[in-house]
Amino acid sequence: MCPACKAEVATVARACRFCRATLRWDGGVPTVEHPQLHAIGAPLLSRDFRREPLPGTRELSGTFPGLRWHATAAGAETSIERSKIRHWTFAARMRDTFVRTFVTAHDANAKVGVVLRRESLDAHFTQYLVQLHPGRQAIMVAREWEGPKSTRATSLADESVHRAIVGPGQPNEIAVAAYGGSIQVWVNHVAVVAIYDSALGIGATGLVFSATEDGDARATFASIEVGAVSA
Amino acid sequence: VSDAPRALACPRCGAPTPFRAPSCAYCGERLAWRGLIELAFADPIATADLSRVALPGTTYPNATREGDHVRIAIQTNRVSWGTFDPRLCDAGIVVTGTCLDAHGSLAVVARLISEGNSVTYYSARVDPASRSARLERAIFADRLHVEALSDWEVNTAIAGVGARNELALLCADSLVQVRVNGVLVISVIDARFGYGRFGWRVDADESGPSVVRLDRVELFHVE
């Protein structure tokens, strides 16, 4: 059985014919084989938030209902109200991508991370979210359908604690590589999650910031780099 | 389950490769791509011969068996549809049927995923009255949101009202192709939806109710 989509697979098949996951066989048991990905060349898109605006914005400071941000010597300091979420994405649509960001959560309610393959159709978005919850030293990955009235999510990696993630007040480096259905995440240079999902293939890349329902949250985004990825 | 060749696989190690990838991500083999890849059907996954079995899916309250086919009555501006159970990335769906009046159209859906009350999919349609075909991608949430990937265009391969059409939608990675009666009528590159169910659909437009006769629905791997 394919470990990614649970479809039947032929013994020692190189790949699942249903979800395209590449398989590795060990003792008759298949696991998803992820390619060894790394960024290639200079970043295609990059921002230093000490002196450049957040992706999709033009000013170093701004407000949005439930959200404020302004540039500081450490980056874009942002604050958001409880249970709210905000994305900042570059306009470029990409399939396979490598993204790296440095972000510091300032309190336990902050969730910070990266959005991949965010694509609109009218007022609806489909996307992948890679979110760190530094207050719990945890990470989660989800596939989302976001509409004006509601958001539906499928968890691809449930919230799990990883000691590579540092808590509030200290910066985390989040790096994500997406290649086909393979999405791999490193936090502070440690591989923490690798999932396979082929449902969404293209879209914008950027940052995501949210607050839990326990209270408002603050975080400082220092920089982002987005580039091509290769094995 | 067999190990027949699949579309867009590395010829050296067999790992799936994205369309137009310069090299295999697993073995490093450099890949050369021809100009136009025309996808082909491989081995069958599921077949609904409607002379013997029911339509796949559940949303067809007005379908009746008549000899070797199923006759579906659709109300004005409504849709009936259904899907096979397997979810796939790369596959081809084929529906064979006849629109018996000018209000109906025949369609197939691909890579359909539902998330709560939301559904996303590709859909290829033929309108026999205008002998045109269209390929679209859609999200149904509070209502239907549709984008044309290739808008209505006349093609003489499409048979008119009262004549049988065989409509096929083939997907492999970001390649999405539509064939009508064996002729490639649309080929686009779109990577948005990569995985899901495949199925059939019949529509009646806003000008009146329609009756459509379906003969077969078939799902294939592609190569």
Image: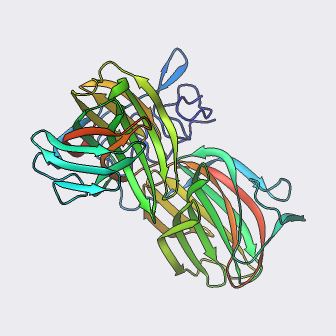
Q: Position of residue A222 (x, y in %)?
A: 17, 40
- In the displayed structure, does residue A185 sit left or right of residue A222? right
Q: Position of residue A226 (x, y in %)?
A: 23, 46
Q: Say above or below: A70 vs B147.
A: above
Which of A152 and A189 lies nearest the eye of the viewer?
A: A152
Which of A20 and A64 lies nearest the eye of the viewer?
A: A64
User: Could one spot residue B195 in this view of the protein?
Assistant: yes
Q: Position of residue A110 (x, y in %)?
A: 34, 35
Q: Residue furthest front?
A: A215
Kindly identify the residue that appears in the image at 23 percent across and 36 percent down: A103
- In the displayed structure, does residue B23 sit left or right of residue A200? left
Answer with the quarter of the image where residue A73 lies: top left
- In the displayed structure, does residue B25 sit left or right of residue B7? left
Kindly identify the residue that appears in the image at 36 percent across and 20 percent down: A162
Kindly identify the residue that appears in the image at 46 percent across and 39 percent down: A142
Q: Position of residue B12 (x, y in %)?
A: 38, 36
Quarter holding the N terminus of chain B?
A: top right
Which of A46 and A54 lies nearest the eye of the viewer?
A: A54
Q: Say above or below: B7 vs A105.
A: below
Q: Residue furthest right?
A: B67
User: Could one spot residue A49 in this view of the protein?
Assistant: no
